[in-house]
Image (cartoon, helix red, strand yellow):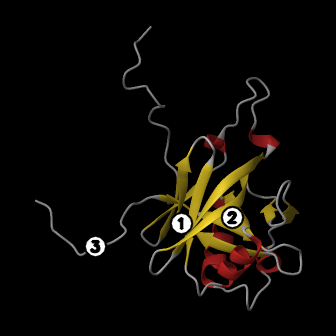
Amino acid sequence: MKQVWKPGTMIYPLPAILVGCGDCPENYNLLTVAWVGTICTNPAMCYISVRPERHSYGLIKKNMEFSLNLTTASMAKAVDWCGVRSGRDYDKFKETKLTPLKGSMISAPIIEESPLSIECRVKEIIKLGSHDMFIAEVLCTNADEKYISEKTGAFDLGVADLIAYSHGQYYHLGEKIGKFGWSVQKNK
């Protein structure tokens, strides 16, 4: 039997993302976001939802760009710290010892320690309520070469030890149980 609860956002797990924003080293900032996702393949587009009172909100709105940086277990403490401290009060790169790199196509920073950084330009801001949604076009993706197979040239996020966020907790991703299309694949 299922209980009926009030409306809520219990769609978990979600990626634990560090969003890079700002347009120069003096105002670079990081924001932890779990309200993030893909919304279109062609053109490649994604979104983040951010509370307007967050320090990063103004930086993103002013510059209309940001980076999405996937996070690993070794980055977990920094991910949490960036989610509970404000860039108004701290230099988050300095405090977390993460390394900012200039984006290839945007002024906002990407994170050297991230296995994958996605550079985005905001196309639209939708006011929703507690959060505003920044809909963005993906301009490019920066992949750490240590996760690219020399044999196949494929990027292997499975070895990156990515983390996920689920209802106030951080988790390692579990073991692979299948791949896209495996349920209908004919055995050879």
Instruction: Categorize mark 2 by other alpha carbons within 10 Å: few (<14), some (14-19), many (20+).
Output: some
Q: Which residue is mark 3?
A: 7
Question: What residue is at 84 percent from the left and 58 percent from the top?
Answer: 103
- Mark 1 surroundings within 10 Å by alpha-carbon count, few (fewer than 14), some (14 through 19), many (20 or more): many
What amino acid type should be assigned to the residue bearing mark 2?
Answer: Met
Query: Which residue is situated farthest in the bottom direction here?
Result: 89
Secondary element at image label 1? loop
Q: Position of residue 21 (x, y in %)?
A: 75, 71
Please tell me how crowded label 3 is: few (under 14), some (14-19), or many (20+) other residues with Cα within 10 Å.
few
What residue is pinned by disc 2? 75
Gap in Å between the C-alphas at discs 1 and 2? 15 Å
Residue 136, numbered circle: none
Residue 84 horizontal side relative to residue 12, left or right: right
Q: Identify which residue is drawn at 37% across, 69% down.
A: 9
Sequence order check: which comes first, mark 3 or mark 1? 3
Which secondary structure, mark 3?
loop
Residue drawn at (76%, 23%) of the image: 151
Viewer-side label of 2, 3: 3
